[in-house]
Amino acid sequence: ETDTRHLTHTATTTAVCRLNGFTSELVRMSAGPTLHSEEAQSSAASIETHQSSSSSAAGIETERSSTGSAAAPESGRGGREEGAEVELDATAAKRIYEGDRVCEAVKPPIWTRLGVEELMEGRVPRVREVLVPHLRGEGRLTCEAALLLCRRATQLLARDPNLLQRSAPLTVLGDVHGQFFDLLNILDQLAGLPASADEVSPDDLDEEEEAAGEKSPPAESVVRDHLLEVNSDHTYVFLGDYVDRGSFSTEVCLLLFAAKILRPAQVILLRGNHECRLLANHFHFERECKNKYSREVFEAFMTAFDALPLAVKVTSPRGDYLLMHGGPSPHLEKVEDINEIDRFVETPKTGALCDLLWSDPLGEDTAQDVLHDPEIMEEWYAVDFEPNPDRGCGQVFGYSALKRFLDQNNLLCVIRGHEIQKTGYYEHHFHRKDTEHPLLITVFSCPNYSDMYLNKAAVLLLDETSYSFRQFNWVTHPYVLPKFMNGLSYSLPNVIENVLDFLVHIMEMVEDVDDDEEDSSPDSIERATRIRRKILGVARMSRMMGTLREEQEDLVKLKNLSGGKLPMGTLIRGKTSIAEKLATFERIRAKDRANEAIPGAAVATDGSSDAGGRSRRFTCRF
């Protein structure tokens, strides 16, 4: 009876969930257009008759969508302006925070948006005492506050040169990829605070992981000042890739921008390959920005990303390090040449800027089978720069290219991110017995990447005379539906499954009537055959919809790993087939290779490649 264009998606979903027998926790997952307070209250009232007294959590969550979790409705539909805050009356507030919740362990998200007056103290954001608790509680900022953080951070970032100069000690974090709650856990533990109560520890750690874990110093020996402490002078370097893959990219960026404003000299944010418009659109950062804020906020993020510096040179008594996201480039002989790059542009598909963000080292595993053959190993060591077959842009650099770059610039080591590592880090010695210090170190600070790799995260602690790693497991985070879909869309497979079951029962009844008539004429037999075929077809479709409903999360992961299409027969074979295809870390990594490449690149997922040159036999297994 109510125009659904004026309903929040959560309100619509509540009625659907009641109808389909879903638990009201499903409503907690949804996000949709927000409303004027009068419209929200009217919409909630219109569906209250569909809710039992035990479903107050569902009713509670009707108001939750008014936090602006999605883009506003199109003009002319009675919606409100994007990002506008909706007032919460006393009755609604009491129902949200004091009502009976079906799932009491799930706390209601913070209702009100955080405005400029509450966030800022003069020109400095109140990060630890205001911003962090608000974002941790799933609260959001007003568009005005979000724009303020983006623009002030852009001003500071734009003043920095492409190549920054710093001295040890400092802390290095790799890719974050929108995993906001894991980032908070890492920062708290680095500061000596207790680990999150929701930290997950995988039970099947292999010996390699355990051995790697022994390198991590005990917590008390790595206590640092917290990133968000105003008076701290300790430097934190982030290697890029703050967005995409995870569901909380805006929270990550707003926190780091606020930290940059708070401590401009000690918080260094480098640019990664995901900080560009192409990948923001290809994955879901653009969708997330519009869902939670507005198009204007998304454009402000993109402008800030264009201003991110490209590299940091770190001096220490032991030697100098170069920090970047990807790797060196054949277009750069001297480190100082980085300052000649115009970084205030969209990332190109070729050239020095592209290489700094997209390049990868030649994998040491490509030489495992030929270590005993000195002649082939000499060829392996001679690999220079080659086109990157797995990324579709950038370079693959071998030992020869990296060693020459280090020697020309009097560097001890290159530190980079960009690649997932099972233990959170990797020390690249390139099978050289004559190098005590690794020539390259990869740091990846995103545990359980994309909620499916089950990898650890790591942070590099670089001191004056040594370095060490600190590893972290992942923590649980609030559930977000795939691609920020609303609860109504998510529940459709269940609706369709029930409709198909209904049709099966009707057809079976028709078939029983035909059997009772015992008509053996050809027309009757043919009609019965057609009915049986329809029953089998509908039953098959029902089974497929049941699989889609029960395994929707894993199916979304599998679809993303399979180039946007599910493997043939997946829905019919059911849960076992899905589990087999998502079985191991290496298999997931191989299937996910297409998502690690630049959009539009022809990348094989079976380990094959069309790369030419001397490195072909090696990069084809990279």
Image: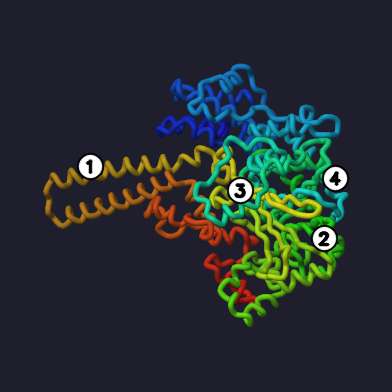
Q: Residue at x 71, y 43 (%)?
A: 221
Relative image position of residue 330 (x, y in whole percent)? 77, 71
Image depth: mark 3 or mark 2 in front? 2
Marks 1 and 3 sit apart, C-alpha to C-alpha, by 53 Å
Q: Which residue is under mark 1?
A: 509
Marks 3 and 2 sit apart, C-alpha to C-alpha, by 30 Å
Image depth: mark 4 or mark 2 in front? 2
Q: Which residue is under mark 3?
A: 447
Question: Can you say whether 353 is above or below 451 in the image?
Answer: below
Callout 3 secondary element = loop
Q: Quadrant of residue 355?
A: bottom right
Would residue 176 be visible to someone looking at this image?
A: no
User: What's the mark number on residue 265?
Assistant: 4
Q: Which residue is under mark 2?
A: 319
Of the pair 605 and 20, the residue shown nearer to us: 605
Marks 4 and 2 sit apart, C-alpha to C-alpha, by 22 Å
Of the pair 566 and 583, the residue shown nearer to us: 583
Relative image position of residue 198 (x, y in whole percent)? 57, 37
Name the image quarter holding the C terminus. Answer: bottom right
**Which amino acid does the dot numbered 4 rest on?**
Ala
User: What's the mark number on residue 139?
Assistant: none
Q: Residue at x 72, y 30 (%)?
A: 114
Q: Choose the circle earlier in sequence order: 1 or 2.
A: 2
Image depth: mark 1 or mark 3 in front? 3
Mark 2 packing: few (<14 Cα in 10 Å), some, or many (20+)?
few
**Which amino acid does the dot numbered 2 rest on?**
Gly
Callout 2 secondary element = loop
Relative image position of residue 439 (x, y in whole percent)? 73, 65
Relative image position of residue 192 (x, y in whole percent)? 70, 38
